[in-house]
Image (spheres, rainbow, N blue to C red):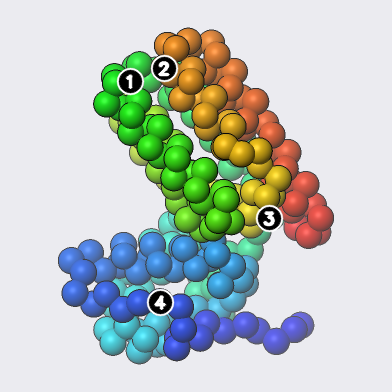
Amino acid sequence: MGRREVFDPAVGLTPRATDTDLPSRLAADIREMINEGKLSPGQQLRQQDLARRFGISRVPVRETLSLLVAEAAVCHDPNRGFHVAPLSSSEARQLYRIRHLLETQLLSTVRWPDASELADLRARLALLDHHLTERARAAWVRAHREFHGAIFALSPDAVLRREVMRLMRQTDRYRAMAAPDIAGYRFPADPEHHLVETLAAQDREALLDAYRRDRSAVEKRLLASLTARAL
């Protein structure tokens, strides 16, 4: 067995001890570090190191790690403690299959956006295009999730929306892991632009077709990337 990689508390995170919801804030920071590849699959996360880095007690640190365990971004073992969850083709395939089913249902219920909502979506598209040109993968993943969240917010089905967004956060690290493929994206971000065009045209069939084609391409590209890494 190789040397166990351990989180270095001296780098990477910015203390935010005055935040009112510290565990959620710290979880967002750690999640982004995972997406950026600063924390690798299997890497150990020691509570005492995190607590010392933030100048806080271990209680909010444990709450933070528990949040990430619930998202399957972090695993906990009684002997090993907390560590970044491994990646696998099997998990990715199942997660994207569930997402496909739920997101298709959600998109079938969205109302058509008004002029201000379309303007907001187009502004988000401009941000996605910017991140593509800058090769800013973590920022792109975050903006990509928020873009889709804005579309899903047009649906009245609150329970489905919450579950879909939870699954999107859970698959962020897979999408980020395939981030070198962002270089192969056509500019602008064609799939996302097609979604907005179909929403503006109020064409349900075209909306669902654009989504399915994009989802199929993403899943194929991701699984190929995982297979190349023998995961």
Circle nearer the N terminus (1, 4): 4
Q: Residue at x 41, y 17 (%)?
A: 200
Judged left or right of residue 217, residue 193 is left
* Amino acid residing under circle 4: Leu
Task: Tell which tag, 2 or 4, sits nearer the viewer.
Answer: 2
Q: Dot 4 corresponds to which residue?
A: 13
Q: Is residue 66 above or below residue 145?
A: below
Pointers 2 and 1 in contact (CB under 8 A)?
A: yes
Q: CA distance from mark 2 to mark 1?
A: 7 Å
**Residue 200: mark:** 2
Q: CA distance from mark 3 to mark 1?
A: 33 Å
Q: Dot 3 corresponds to which residue?
A: 180
Res 99 → quadrant: top right
Q: Is residue 106 above or below residue 163?
A: above
Q: CA distance from mark 1 to mark 4?
A: 38 Å
**Residue 113: mark:** 1
Q: Residue at x 29, y 19 (%)?
A: 114
